[in-house]
Image (tube, grey):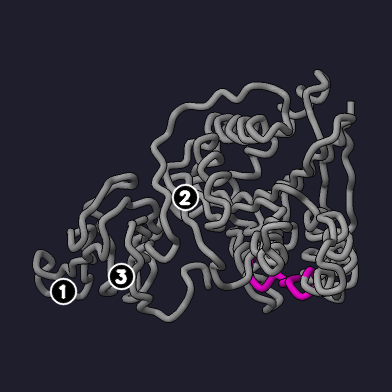
């Protein structure tokens, strides 16, 4: 058996407290790719936490049967800092209380590192690039708890062939964010995860965790040096979708993907899924047109037409409630795949997303994932 469990100590923000990461490693005797997976980098997004518990159990069984190849690294909770951020009993794990921003934004871009290696020797191997990336990560600042956490997660993941970051939305269908260069692997992952939506982009803005792993390879991409890390963010439905049944389904989806990539030596058992693969810039980021209570006229998974009524905002100040409704219309033809769990909205709030097929005008000047 190759399974080991490591505990990595982290800085604490106050005396008398302790933080650490747990890391599960499967180092198989048979050579193969390195896979890295983590959950709850946004520490209030919990479906992935349970999914990885089921996945670890599955991998332990597969390990006993000598069916694993390469190395699999799993961080079952990636953000103990955010998980500790409770206010009036509510975990607020998306942004750091230390004023260092969104936990899944502003990750370093190591493109200059790989470019320097290429400029020194255009024939450098993938392993030489990875050595340089590991060295660059080792030199990252660690003076704050969050800086140290980021450096630690990158130390575990920067040299992986496959990086999967598990998140969730407010209320949503399973969907996947990935780079357009990796369409084939993204669609395979979607089939394995039964995800009806794949959103492809070049760089989503905001420098999320997955971008830190692919941008260094895009910077040196050539016929002789292809992008050597497949990275994707998997959104496992919504905040409330945390239960054993869903987690087992999602864990099996990850097993299927690893089987399809020959990390697990077993045939995948997939269910055919109709997948809409589209451009991230073709997503209608639905905005509230007024302040009040939002009432959706469409359900998650429904197709809508451009200009179709999809929701109304009820004005709580209206003298005539029946007349005090403001319509929201779709800007595109596509599938409604996320809605906001909060029903009291302010004008301009992002309250849902529709995956369309035509690139839309950016009305806010910000990236879809900039917040």
Residue on which disc 2 sits: 198
How many residues crowd around disc 1 within 10 Å: few (fewer than 14), some, or many (20 or more)? few
Quarter location, residue 210: bottom right
Assign a secondary structure to mark 1: loop
Q: Which mark is residue 318?
A: 1
Q: CA distance from mark 1 to mark 3?
A: 17 Å
Q: Main secondary structure of the magenta part?
A: loop
Q: Which mark is residue 288?
A: 3
Q: Residue at x 20, y 55 (%)?
A: 305
Please give left or right for residue 350 compared with residue 190 in the image: left
Please give left or right for residue 127 compared with residue 271 in the image: right
Q: Nearer the viewer, residue 278 or 99?
A: 278
- Residue 85: where, in percent of width, then height? 67, 64
Q: Is residue 245 above or below residue 38?
A: above
State which region is magenta. 104-114
- Which of the two discs, 2 and 1, labels the residue nearer the N terminus? 2
How many residues crowd around disc 3 within 10 Å: few (fewer than 14), some, or many (20 or more)? many
Residue found at the very far bottom of the displayed protein: 365
Q: For the image shown, how many numbered marks are present on the structure?
A: 3
Please give left or right for residue 245 compared with residue 218 in the image: left
Q: Residue at x 76, y 70 (%)?
A: 110
Q: CA distance from mark 2 to mark 1?
A: 40 Å
- Residue 253: where, in percent of width, then height? 58, 33
CB contact under 8 Å: marks 2 and 1:
no
CB contact under 8 Å: marks 1 and 3:
no
Quarter location, residue 79: bottom right
* Magenta highlight on residue 197: no
- Residue 39: where, in percent of width, then height? 67, 49
Q: Is residue 317 above or below residue 250?
A: below
Assign a secondary structure to mark 2: strand
- Residue 368: where, in percent of width, then height? 46, 68
Quarter location, residue 294: bottom left
């Amino acid at each position: 058996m190759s399974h080991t469990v490591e505990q990595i100590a982290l800085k604490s923000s106050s005396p008398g407290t302790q933080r650490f990461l747990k890391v599960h490693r499967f180092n198989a005797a048979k050579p193969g790719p390195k896979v890295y997976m983590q959950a709850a980098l946004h520490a209030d997004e919990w479906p992935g936490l349970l999914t990885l518990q089921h996945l670890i159990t599955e991998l332990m069984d597969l390990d006993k049967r000598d069916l694993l190849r390469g190395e699999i690294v799993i961080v079952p909770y990636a953000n103990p800092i955010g998980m500790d951020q409770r206010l009036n009993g509510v975990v607020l794990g998306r942004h750091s209380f230390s004023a260092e921003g969104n936990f899944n934004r502003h990750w370093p871009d190591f493109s200059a590192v790989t470019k320097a290696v290429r400029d020194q020797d255009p024939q450098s191997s993938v392993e030489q690039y990875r050595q340089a990336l590991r060295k660059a990560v080792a030199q990252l600042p660690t003076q704050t708890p969050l800086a140290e956490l980021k450096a630690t997660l990158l130390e575990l993941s920067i040299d992986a062939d496959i990086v999967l970051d598990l998140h969730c939305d407010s209320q949503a269908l399973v969907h996947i964010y990935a780079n357009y260069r990796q369409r084939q692997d993204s669609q395979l992952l979607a089939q394995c995860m039964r995800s009806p939506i794949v959103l492809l982009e070049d760089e989503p803005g905001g420098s999320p965790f997955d971008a830190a792993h692919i941008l260094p390879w895009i910077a040196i991409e050539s016929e002789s040096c292809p992008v050597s890390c497949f990275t994707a963010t998997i959104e496992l439905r919504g905040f409330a979708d945390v239960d054993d049944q869903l987690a087992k389904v999602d864990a099996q989806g990850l097993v299927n993907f690893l089987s399809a990539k020959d990390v697990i030596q077993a045939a995948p058992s997939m269910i055919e899924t109709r997948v809409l693969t589209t451009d991230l810039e073709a997503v209608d980021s639905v905005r509230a047109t007024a302040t009040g209570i939002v009432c959706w006229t469409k359900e998650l998974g429904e197709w809508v037409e451009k200009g179709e009524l999809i929701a109304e905002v009820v004005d709580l100040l209206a003298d005539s409630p029946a007349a005090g409704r403001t319509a929201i219309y779709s800007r595109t033809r596509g599938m409604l795949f996320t809605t906001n769990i909060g029903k009291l909205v302010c004008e301009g709030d992002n309250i849902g997303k529709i995956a369309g097929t035509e690139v839309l005008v950016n009305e806010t000047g910000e990236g879809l994932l900039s917040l």
